[in-house]
Amino acid sequence: MMDMDIDFVRAQFPVLSDPSMAGKAFFENAGGSFACRQVIDRLTRFYRERKVQPYWDFEPSRTGGEEMDESRTRLSVLLGVAEDELHFGPSTTQNVYVLAQAFREWLQRGDAIVVTDQDHEANSGAWRGLADHGIEVREWRLDPDTGHLDHAKLVDLLDERVRLVAFPHCSNVIGEINDVAAISRMAHAAGAVVCVDGVSYAPHGLPDIGQLGADIYLFSAYNIWPTSGDHDDPP
Ligand SMILES: Cc1ncc(COP(=O)(O)O)c(C=O)c1O
């Protein structure tokens, strides 16, 4: 395994050379994160030179639009999804809320969904609210002794009425990493759509969503220590 050059990594984050951070380590997970200098440089340039309506025929508008397109292209490659499968929204909580409203229109009375008690409120509350609209909400409960979501229990909850299974990639409650690919296969075999909360997982390694097989995978960009992929100043 290659050794990580920790001095190089730390040097990318201006905040770490600030006297206020001297002698401190930063272990925030699924919370606000400091950005590296490449991201700060790009944001600064965008705000100073390009923050106008994009795609018009003058320099700031053209370059601003190109940079937005570039972020879509690069992120979709990193995540293993097609560009038109990627959506930028305000926050995971709000995105799930909007999704739940869309599902409310699509689902019929008597349909069922599965939620867990290992989730953050973001991937739970809005789905549970569908009970007020005639949708049966089934709870996949964790084992109180181990904290695990037992796959055998999911089998008992799945049948042809289940349209959605919502669960976390990594639980922010107990830190367990769930086998998204296996759970997605089980849900798909029952004809259900899979919605995964990746907020706790993404800071530790951007997932290859194409490989995982989830239909919907959410994470919050402001929670991860982003790198632009450039090690030099932006072009
Ligand atoms: C596991 C998990 N999911 C979802 C969220 C909510 O994300 P957002 O603040 O983008 O709505 C959080 C926030 O802490 C979280 O820890």
Image (spheres, rainbow, N blue to C red):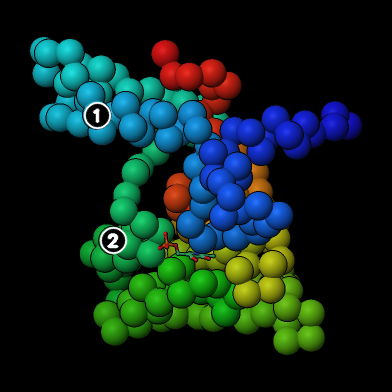
Q: Amino acid at mark 1?
A: Arg
Q: Say left or right for 172 vs 182.
A: left
Q: Alpha-carbon neighbours of circle 2 within 10 Å: few (<14), some, or many (≥20)?
A: some
Q: Nearer the viewer, mark 1 or mark 2?
A: 1
* Label 1: which secondary element: helix
Query: Can the viewer see residue 56?
Result: yes
- The percent coordinates of residue 198 (x first, y second) are 55, 55
- The percent coordinates of residue 228 (x first, y second) are 50, 29
Residue at image coords 73%, 74%: 148
Q: Dot 2 corresponds to which residue?
A: 98
- Above-or-below relation of 66 to 199: above
Q: CA distance from mark 1 to mark 2?
A: 32 Å
Residue 167 sits in quarter: bottom right
* Label 2: which secondary element: helix
Ligand 1 closer than 8 Å to label 2 CB: no
Q: Amino acid at mark 2?
A: Val
Query: Can the viewer see residue 160?
Result: no
Q: Say left or right for 84 vs 173.
A: left
Image disc number at residue 48: 1
- Mark positioned earlier in the residue sequence (1 or 2): 1
- Of the pair 226 and 163, the residue shown nearer to us: 226
Residue at image coords 68%, 57%: 24
